[in-house]
Image (tube, grey):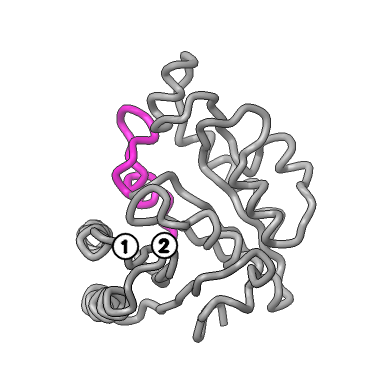
Amino acid sequence: MSTYFITAIDTDAGKTVVTGLLAKFIKELGRDVITMKLSQTGCEKLSDDIVMHRQIMGMELSNDDQNGLTCPYLFQFPASPHLAAAMENRRISEKVLIKAIDAIEKKHDHVLVEGLGGLMVPINEELLVVDFIQMYSVPVILVTSGRLGSINHTLLTLEALKARNIPVYGLIYNHYPVTAPEITADSALLIKSYLQRYYPAALWGEVPVLDHDACTGKALKLNGWFE
């Protein structure tokens, strides 16, 4: 059994699509894989991100999706999870999250857990996403891109992970949103060099710009991943 935590440099970096594509990639290797989401806001009955995962994976929603095991917390207001929970007089419990992950791990060989925004997003008033990753002790896959500000955000994220001795399995460079070719190439080169500096054994992967029809696991540029 292998579990990976998918985090990103910030919101809208593409980790939902990347999580689905990684799961499809593993599935196309002939392996049993499922995805999870810690929590989602702006939803009522089902996690939109879980629905997107299943669409990318070419799967129907499972009973675990329908009953909320793969996304233990849903909140209606589209805000940071701690605020959305407080607005409903609720609180996200790390024990509930870990119990859900443990239950899914017993059913599947590979589990991809999608986080919430970036590392410093508060899950509740005392717990950040990075605290949860450190507590659960699971390797990270970091999603970044070439958009303006991504170099700063990526290096800060790598520094924070390194400071807490959190293992990084790999980094996915998302080519969306599209930037000037010079920016894309330079950002990728610089981020890759710092990844090797912080985590010499970490893997590098890329998501090219995809249309809906090309949204398959094989479209990912992954060398040596999940071998």
Residue 177, label in figure: 2
Figure label count: 2
- Furthest residue toward bottom: 223
Q: Tell me if residue 88 comes above or below residue 32 in the rendering.
A: above
Whole-number angstrom distance, CA of label 1 to CA of label 2? 7 Å
Asked whether the beta carbons under mark 1 and mark 2 sit within 8 Å of each other, the answer is yes
Specify whether 155 is left or right of 138.
left
Q: Tell me if residue 198 comes above or below residue 125 in the rendering.
A: below
Specify whether 79 is left or right of 70.
left
Q: Amino acid at mark 2?
A: Pro
Specify whether 209 is left or right of 199.
right
Q: Amino acid at mark 1?
A: Arg
Q: Which residues are magenta?
A: 119-139
Specify whether 44 is left or right of 202.
right
Residue 147, label in figure: 1
Residue 210, label in figure: none
Magenta-colored stretch includes residue 220: no
Residue found at x 36% / y 44%: 129
Mark 2 secondary-structure assignment: loop
Residue found at x 33% / y 78%: 181
Q: Nearer the viewer, residue 157 or 219?
A: 219
Can you say which quadrant of the picture contains the N terminus?
bottom right
Residue found at x 40% / y 71%: 173
Image coords of residue 111 (percent x, y): 60, 59
